[in-house]
Structures are given as structure tokens and as C-alpha cells.
Image (cartoon, helix red, strand yellow):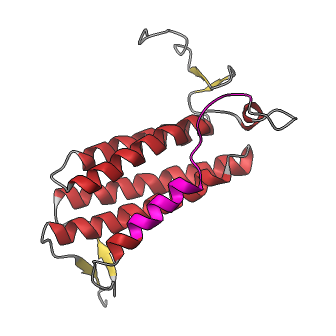
């Protein structure tokens, strides 16, 4: 597989299905941000965390790669008029969302009740989780805009929403595992 194709030298890129769009197209921004998120998930996975969480993060990375391919496929290329799939690409589904929810519930059951907003930080690994959460929210916002303009599979929006919740809980769980004090946000009076 050749790394450079020179087909993007004039500022366009190909989508799954063959059409070409500008590299600043909302669809490209959406799946590019999912790719950025996947890189941050890899960074978290490479930290000194427990093996179960590493396995969960690897599964999430696979889901994000699949989600990126879903976003790289224009809606009109996904399904034929008779309902058959035009392109044979995997899709993230409710099982993936359910897996995130199970992990969120599992982490939440071991954490103290949250009484305040929490400031990001306390440990580099925890901070990586918060950065990933923010990138995930950006991917979600871009995907919502794309959905409003062209349509995307609604599970995309659900998955990204749930993943940001997972990343917040992961930050809390890792704070606990690393014996890091969570810093509560308490508004200062002027």
C-alpha cells in the first residue's frame, strides 16, 4: 500500500464510495476529529493503568475506527433503494453503546458520590482523559452538524455522547486508582 497517492495535492480527498470533497468539508472534520480522539485514547491506553481498562480502550479504538469509516461514507452511498447495503463496511451499533454503559456503571459503583463539578488535572493520565473527553465532545458537535446537513447514522451521535461520559468516569476512576485528590470546582465569590 503506497502512503502517498498525490490525489489530495489540490485540497480534496476521497470518501468511501468514490466521491471527492474538499479537505475542509464538515464530513472530513467529523471523521478527522474521531481519528484525533482515537490517538488520545491510544495515549491513555499506553499509561500505567490496569489491564481490564486497557482492553476496554482497545475495543473503543476499534469502535472509533469503525465510526470513522461510517462518517467517511456519504449517506446516499450506505443503502440502496431496496434496503441492501451498498458498501460492506462494519457499523458501530447499540451493543457498542451498551458496552460503554456497562463500563460506566461498573466504574461509578466504586467511586464516591459526586457533589461538585471537578476541575481537570491532578495527574497526567487523568488530564489525558479530560483532553480526550473534550475532543470527543468536539467530534460529537461536528457529527451533529453533519447530521443536520447531510444525515449520519444516529448511533454515531449516541456512541460519541456515551463515550464522553465514559471518559469522564475513566478520569474519576483513574484519580481513585492513582490516589489523586479530585479538585472540586467551587465558584469564588467576587
Q: x and y percent of residue 183 in the render?
A: 22, 77
Q: x and y percent of residue 175 in the render?
A: 20, 69
Residue found at the far right of this picture: 82
- Identify which residue is drawn at 32% across, 86% down: 113
Magenta run includes residue 88? yes
Q: Is residue 32 above or below residue 160?
A: above
Q: x and y percent of residue 45 in the render?
A: 26, 48
| 40 sits left or right of 99 in the view | left
Q: Quadrant of residue 73?
A: top right
Q: Quadrant of residue 182?
A: bottom left
- Identify which residue is drawn at 37% across, 61% down: 167
Residue found at the far left of this picture: 179
Using the image as rendered, state which of residue 154 and residue 85 is in the foreground: 85
- Identify which residue is drawn at 40% across, 63% down: 166
Q: Which residues are magenta?
A: 86-104
Using the image as rendered, state which of residue 100 and residue 16 is in the foreground: 100
Q: Is residue 14 above or below residue 184?
A: above
- Identify which residue is drawn at 74% across, 28% down: 86
Using the image as rendered, state which of residue 44 and residue 36 is in the foreground: 44
Magenta run includes residue 85? no
| 42 sits left or right of 36 in the view | left
Q: Could you tell me which quadrant the C terminus lies in?
A: bottom left
Q: x and y percent of residue 80 in the render?
A: 82, 32
- How many numbered circles are shown? 0
| 112 sits left or right of 12 in the view | left
Q: Is residue 79 above or below residue 120?
A: above
Amino acid at each position: 500500500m503506497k502512503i502517498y497517492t498525490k490525489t489530495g495535492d489540490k485540497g480534496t480527498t476521497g470518501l468511501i464510495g468514490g466521491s471527492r470533497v474538499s479537505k475542509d468539508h464538515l464530513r472530513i472534520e467529523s471523521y478527522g476529529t474521531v481519528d484525533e480522539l482515537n490517538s488520545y485514547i491510544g495515549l491513555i491506553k499506553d499509561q500505567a493503568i490496569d489491564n481490564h481498562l486497557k482492553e476496554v480502550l482497545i475495543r473503543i479504538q476499534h469502535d472509533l475506527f469503525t465510526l470513522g469509516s461510517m462518517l467517511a461514507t456519504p449517506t446516499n452511498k450506505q443503502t440502496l433503494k431496496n434496503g441492501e447495503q451498498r458498501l460492506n463496511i462494519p457499523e458501530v451499533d447499540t451493543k457498542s453503546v451498551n458496552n460503554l454503559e456497562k463500563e460506566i456503571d461498573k466504574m461509578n459503583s466504586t467511586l464516591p458520590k459526586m457533589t461538585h463539578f471537578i476541575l481537570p488535572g491532578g495527574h497526567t493520565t487523568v488530564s489525558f482523559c479530560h483532553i480526550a473527553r473534550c475532543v470527543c465532545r468536539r467530534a460529537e458537535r461536528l457529527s451533529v452538524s453533519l447530521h443536520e446537513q447531510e444525515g449520519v447514522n444516529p448511533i454515531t451521535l449516541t456512541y460519541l455522547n456515551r463515550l464522553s461520559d465514559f471518559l469522564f468516569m475513566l478520569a474519576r476512576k483513574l484519580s481513585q486508582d492513582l490516589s489523586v485528590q479530585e479538585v472540586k470546582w467551587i465558584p469564588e465569590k467576587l
